[in-house]
């Protein structure tokens, strides 16, 4: 049985990447692909290791039916490039940080989440980054969820052919 392993990556691993993880888990369960797709998240920084997701992220996610409460912050490490097929970053700074620790032959594993938004999407097509909501208001967390929902659906659609091949 083919499987794929994915790690979502942001700066702190308390706002964007845990949100992407929670949304992806929910959509993967819905698609009956939970045995095929391994999902995790991590931060490029070390400030929030061991912490639960930001309360604003948890609250916004729970209103849409996603559970983030059990997740804990951790920092990405070079060994994660062996463990995961894809390391999916939220913004360009995450990409730069990932490239700094990535073994050169595994660079192709680094991608941006918004690459997976379908081109036909009216709102997010062409958007490159999931903007850091940490220093902003609650609307930023809603936007992160909007982006994660569209991009994770696109990601599942992109993975289906290789899982079924
Ligand atoms: P995240 O948001 O990268 O989406 O988890 C942040 C969380 C914490 C900080 C920055 C961004 N911080 O500076 O502590």
Image (tube, rainbow, N blue to C red):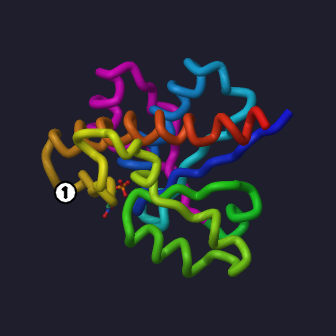
Q: Is residue 55 visible?
A: no
Residue at figure coordinates x 40%, y 45% from the top left: 117
Q: Which residue position is annotated with label 1?
A: 135
Image coordinates of residue 58 in percent, x first then y, are: 35, 33
Give the quarter the ligand 1 occupies: bottom left
- Comparing 101 with 37, the one in front is 37
Magenta stretch contains residue 71: yes
Mark 1, other Cα within 10 Å: few <14 / some 14–19 / many ≥20: few
- Comparing 64 with 112, the one in front is 112
Magenta stretch contains residue 75: yes
Query: Does any atom of ligand 1 lie closer than 8 Å to the CB of label 1?
Result: yes
Read off the magenta span. 50-76
Q: Is residue 155 visible?
A: yes
The secondary element bearing badge 1 is classed as: loop
Image coordinates of residue 113 in percent, x first then y, are: 45, 52
Image coordinates of residue 86 in percent, x first then y, are: 63, 55
């Amino acid at each position: 049985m083919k499987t794929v392993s994915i790690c979502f990556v942001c700066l702190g691993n308390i706002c964007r990447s845990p949100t992407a993880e929670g949304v992806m888990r929910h959509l993967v369960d819905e698609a009956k692909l939970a045995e095929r797709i391994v999902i995790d998240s991590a931060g490029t920084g070390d400030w929030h290791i061991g912490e639960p997701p930001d309360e604003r992220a948890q609250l916004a996610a729970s209103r849409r039916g996603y559970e983030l409460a059990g997740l804990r912050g951790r920092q990405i490490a070079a060994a994660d490039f062996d463990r995961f097929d894809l390391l999916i970053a939220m913004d360009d700074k995450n990409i730069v940080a990932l490239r700094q620790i990535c073994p050169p032959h595994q660079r192709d594993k680094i991608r941006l989440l918004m690459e997976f938004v379908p081109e036909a999407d009216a709102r997010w097509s062409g958007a490159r980054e999931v903007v850091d909501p940490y220093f902003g208001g609650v609307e930023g967390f809603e936007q992160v969820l909007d982006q994660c929902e569209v991009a994770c659906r696109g990601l599942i659609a992109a993975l289906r052919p290789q899982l079924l091949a």
